[in-house]
Amino acid sequence: MEKTDTTSPDLDNEAKITLGLLNMVHDNSATSQRSMAGDLGIALGLANAYLKRCVKKGLIKVSQAPANRYAYYLTPNGFAEKSRLTAEFLSESFNLFRRARSESAELFNQCQNHNWKRIALYGTGDLTEIMALSAKDFPIEVACVISRDPGVSEFAGIPVVTQTPNPNDIDAIVICAINGSQTAYDNACANFPPEKVLVFGFLSISKAAKPKERGVK
């Protein structure tokens, strides 16, 4: 099944859920709404609402199956919409990668200009992997990844910690969390000098907000 849980900040949540539903219906017409909701990480009621919307738009048709179950099928319009959304997702993912690679180099140059040699990356995901890859081109050590995900001890070959490191141990923190990026920034600034917390420009993080500790993965 094609993955739709992209970290792209451009493809909106409605499009991601719609693409996910269309992919699942295409892969398995007998899939249940509960299974769809679980795979997409959304509430059952929300999955039902999106399915009804897709049916109303003529993207999916429904037929009753034995044992009071339903079978879902893509219409020609559904196939066309799935192709369109997939192309949009792939295009935006590529654009995100190019922007992230460019900005990661700028962030490492900023660290070099301040003589910051040990940094931490906040969050796990594509941006963290891009930063870890880019670090090989700079004399800077990525000492750890900060994450609230339980049971994760390593990411991209880097040790994972659950608490913000002491400023005496780390020179700077780079926010790499796309989902919940503002919360990640606020949490980092609550326990670390804000002037040493760096961000990707396309995350649109507000630095004016008053930092306070909040739960974030």
Image: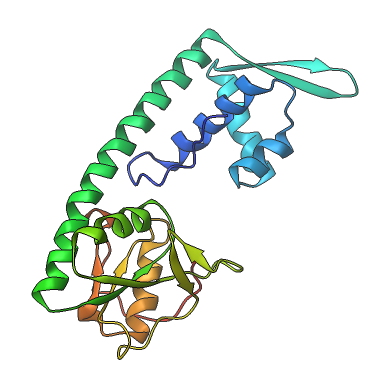
* Residue 140 shows in the view: yes
Residue appearing at x 51%, y 35% in the figure: 3
Where's residue 96, x and y in %?
28, 43
- Compared with residue 71, is residue 15 higher up or lower down, i.e. above or below? below
Q: Is residue 67 left or right of residue 63?
A: right
- The percent position of residue 85, horizontal first and vertical second, equals 41, 26
Q: Quadrant of residue 196?
A: bottom left
> What colouring does the structure picture have?
rainbow
In the image as oriented, which residue stretches furthest toward the bottom? 168
Asked which quadrant contains residue 29, the reply is top right
Which residue appears at 61% of the width and 68% of the height? Answer: 151
Residue 74 is situated, as x and y percent measured from the top left of the image, at 59, 15
137 and 162: which is toward the camera: 137
In-front residue for pair 34/209:
34
Q: Name the quadrant containing residue 141.
A: bottom left
Q: Is residue 142 above or below residue 18?
A: below
5 sits left or right of 71 in the view: left
Quick one: which residue is furthest to the left in this view? 113
In this rendering, would 20 be left or right of 142?
Answer: right
Residue 200 visible at all: no
* Side (left or right) of 166 relative to 163: left
- Count of residue discs: 0
